[in-house]
Image (tube, grey):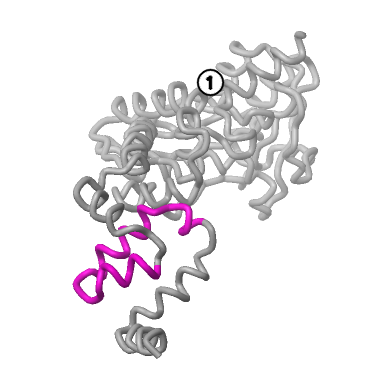
Amino acid sequence: MRERSTATSERKSGFGRYGGYLKKSGSHLQSRPEKKYEIIRERSGEHSVVKMCRILKVSQSGYYRWLACPESATRRENQEIYGTLKESYDQNKGRVGLDKLLDDVRLKFPHCSRNRLYRIQKEHGLYSIRRRKFKATTNSRHNYPVAPNRLQQNFHVEIPNKVWVSDITYIRTDEGWLYLATVKDLFDPQIVGFATGSRIDTDLCKRALNAAIRRYRPSAGLIHHSDQGIQYASSDYQSLLKQNHIIPSMSRKGVPYDNACAESFFSTIKLEMIYHEHYATRAQAQAAVFEYIEVYYNRQRRNAAIGNLPPAEFRRRFYQQNAA
């Protein structure tokens, strides 16, 4: 009779729900007494501590010891994880999401789960910069010959310097537009060459391609893919490709997905840098682009498409494995 009255009082008080909550929570909550102590502390103004300790199967003495010094080993480790998380977040300037931060954290805390890191991230408000819409410009109104599309949206490449893709974008400054031309290797995908300038012309694109050629000296047969823009279709640019035994390839007109592999980098740099900075001069924007590409994107930023490794590290491991 006494047991029935106790159960009835628990249901009336509302705390009887915790019995069901405990059963549903499974072994995770049952193996974490600190979690139970937190529940008891939160509800101690509404229900008896004695009753809650009995239902949650913890000792009163253990609860009061925890209450006197709640800084558990888990909490201390969470603080250490937060320190590593904050270091990675700051190094990436808030540009990357949870999964890339998790890879950095697991270098020191290999057993840290994604959910645990999310809770810590949420607690401290370390969210990544949000995506914004961007547009690309292409002038394909010209009479130059157009190369066939040799990729057909097959962007998977197994060796370096087999397929390079090129594109152009722009950056606003108080002095006017700064244009950025890039050459990306589909293998990494690393930016192997780039150039900036105040004019969106063939010379800009040639300087980017020449930078890539000087750095990597590709063998004959490399495929160069671009859109049908006048800069890439021009006689000067096509002559540069021919001189270096590079095979031209171009997207189909009106099919943006054909060159999505090149434009994806611009989406990334605009999301992570350009949209969130103000540049008084073109020189400031040029310096920011150099830092982002050479220091951060190629060498530090983890890329999910290549096992969450930075492009330069992915390439280094490829050559190391093939040299053995």
Quarter of the figure that contains the C terminus: top right
Q: Residue at x 72, y 29 (%)?
A: 163
Query: Which image quadrant for residue 155?
Result: top right
Badge 1: how crowded within 10 Å, few (<14), some, or many (20+)?
Answer: some
Query: Which image quadrant for residue 14?
Result: bottom left
* Residue 266 % position (x, y): 50, 41
Query: Which image quadrant for residue 148?
Result: top right
* Residue 11 % position (x, y): 37, 86
Q: Is residue 287 left or right of residue 209?
A: left
Whether residue 257 appears in this view of the structure is yes
* Residue 16 % position (x, y): 39, 80
Q: Label 1: state its secondary structure.
A: helix
| Near-viewer residue (237 or 35) | 35
Confirm whether the magenta stretch covers residue 45. yes
What amino acid does circle 1 point to?
A: Arg
| Near-viewer residue (198 or 157) | 157
Q: In this view, does 158 lie to the left or right of 208?
A: right
Q: Which residue is drawn at 40% across and 74% down?
A: 18
Q: Residue at x 63, y 34 (%)?
A: 307
Q: Give the range drawn in magenta.
A: 28-55
Q: Residue at x 37, y 57 (%)?
A: 35
According to the picture, the residue beneath numbered tag 1 turns out to be 207
Quarter of the figure that contains the N terminus: bottom left
* Residue 95 % position (x, y): 40, 41
